[in-house]
Each structure stands twice: as structure tokens, then as C-alpha cells.
């Protein structure tokens, strides 16, 4: 897959998720998509990306994974969990811009795609599709928060457009930093793994209201597991 096609599909994923929010008020199916993406991400991490990373980089990769896990934990303090579907905002009747949520999601979006095209790793396909699947519910959560914040339709779509730039910028930056400059890719790959581990496990453990898993969400998670195994 060419870099231009990868960038195009990242834009498509963000705008598709955002458009679904304005087209459909019922969000039950969005939760199922989120559950599927969590199962898929966890599977490709454990069956493919994590074993390969330890094989190529040794035990030192574990420190970077821990950094990524803690970084995602910190980002979610500001994003209020929007990466895994939380859309709760507090407002007093006045419109406001959720700047902390927007910035933390943008940092997350930038970092998670940086290792996708590292040329000495064979994980590029499954990791990229994991990002795409995660990007749709991520955009759904962000657009929902924009709408609940009282922003006008025009302003909310402008900020969706700005957010859609973060992943392509991360992808291009990753290519330049890791391939052109020939820097050690293990650090950013480990950080991305740690971030995905935090997100995917949180999605699965918080996939239902009251932490109770219904049959449809269980099926969605298992389907994510199955597709992840096939792609790995």
C-alpha cells in the first residue's frame, strides 16, 4: 500500500466516524464497533507485534512499552477516556471548546501511527489496519463531544478537519525520523504498543455499561479476535 493511499484512508476513517455521529443518533452500533476494534488491536499485539518486537529488540523494548502505557494513562487524564469511547462532558449551558480533550487525542493520534511504516518490521499491514479500525470510534467520540459542547456545526467540522491531519502527520514524521534518519525504531514502536495495550484492554473491560458484557458485545470482541488472528 502506498503512503498516499494510507494517508487517504486515515482521512476517510476520521470523516466517516464523524459523519456517522451527525447521521445517526442511536449509538449502540458504535459501541459494537469499538468492542470489535478493541479485540482486533489486542490480538495483533499479542500474536504478532509484541513477539516480533521482543525478538528484534530484546528485553529493552519492555521499558518503552511501559513508557507508552504510562503516557496513554496520562493522556487519558486529559481526554477523559475519549480514545475508548467515553463521551461525557460537563457544561453549564454555554458552548465551550474541549481543548484538553482535543490536544490529548491529537497527541495520541500522532504517536500511534509513527511506527507503521518502519521498513525493518513485518507488522506494517496489521498495525495499520488496527489504527484504521481504532480511528473510526475515536472520531465518533470526538465529534460527539464537540456536539455536546455546544459548538456550531461549522466549528465542530473545522476541528474534525484539524484532528484528521494529526495521523497523516504522524505517519510522515515516522517515515522521516525512523527511515530517512535511520534512527532506532524500537523506542517509538514500544511506546505505540504500550498505548495500544492500554486502550484495547480498557475497551474490553469497559465495553458495557456497569462493566457487564452483553452477548452482542461479546460476539463483537470475539469477531475482532478472529479477524486479528487471520491477519496476523
Image (spheres, rainbow, N blue to C red):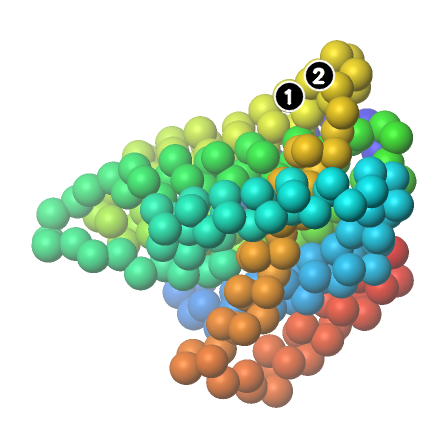
Q: Quadrant of the N terminus?
A: top right
Residue at 59% across, 24% down: 169
Q: Nearer the viewer, residue 230 or 205?
A: 205
In the picture, measured across the screen, residue 99 lies left or right of residue 73, that is left
In the picture, measured across the screen, residue 223 lies left or right of residue 109, that is right
Tell me whether circle 1 and circle 2 mark residues in contact (CB < 8 Å): yes
Above or below, 141 relative to 104: below
Residue 173: image tag:
1
Q: Secondary structure at mark 2?
A: helix
**Quarter of the rendering containing residue 55:** top right
Q: Position of residue 89 (x, y in %)?
A: 26, 56
Residue at 81% across, 64% down: 227
**Quarter of the rendering containing residue 223:** bottom right
In the picture, measured across the screen, residue 193 lies left or right of residue 150, that is right
Above or below, 138 relative to 155: below
Q: Position of residue 123 (x, y in %)?
A: 83, 43
Q: Which residue is mark 2?
A: 176
In the picture, measured across the screen, residue 197 lies left or right of residue 98, that is right
Q: Nearer the viewer, residue 19 or 131?
A: 131
Determine if residue 149 is in view: yes
Determine if residue 8 is in view: no
Amino acid at each position: 500500500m502506498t503512503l498516499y493511499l494510507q494517508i487517504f484512508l486515515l482521512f476517510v476513517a476520521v470523516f466517516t466516524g464523524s459523519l456517522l455521529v451527525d447521521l445517526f443518533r442511536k449509538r449502540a452500533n458504535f459501541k459494537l464497533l469499538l468492542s470489535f476494534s478493541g479485540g482486533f488491536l489486542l490480538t495483533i499485539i499479542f500474536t504478532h507485534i509484541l513477539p516480533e518486537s521482543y525478538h528484534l529488540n530484546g528485553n529493552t523494548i519492555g521499558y518503552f512499552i511501559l513508557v507508552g502505557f504510562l503516557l496513554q494513562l496520562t493522556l487519558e487524564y486529559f481526554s477523559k477516556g475519549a480514545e475508548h469511547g467515553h463521551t461525557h462532558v460537563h457544561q453549564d449551558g454555554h458552548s465551550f471548546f474541549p481543548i484538553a480533550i482535543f490536544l490529548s487525542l491529537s497527541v495520541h493520534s500522532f504517536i500511534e501511527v509513527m511506527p507503521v511504516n518502519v521498513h525493518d518490521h513485518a507488522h506494517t499491514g496489521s498495525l495499520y489496519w488496527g489504527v484504521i479500525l481504532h480511528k473510526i470510534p475515536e472520531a465518533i467520540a470526538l465529534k460527539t463531544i464537540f456536539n455536546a459542547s455546544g459548538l456550531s456545526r461549522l466549528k465542530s467540522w473545522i476541528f474534525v478537519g484539524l484532528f484528521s491531519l494529526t495521523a497523516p502527520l504522524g505517519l510522515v514524521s515516522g517515515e522521516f525520523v525512523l527511515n530517512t534518519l535511520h534512527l532506532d525504531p524500537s523506542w517509538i514502536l514500544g511506546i505505540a504498543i504500550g498505548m495500544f495495550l492500554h486502550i484495547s484492554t480498557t475497551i474490553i473491560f469497559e465495553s458495557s455499561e456497569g462493566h457487564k458484557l452483553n452477548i452482542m458485545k461479546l460476539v463483537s470482541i470475539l469477531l475482532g479476535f478472529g479477524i486479528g488472528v487471520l491477519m496476523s
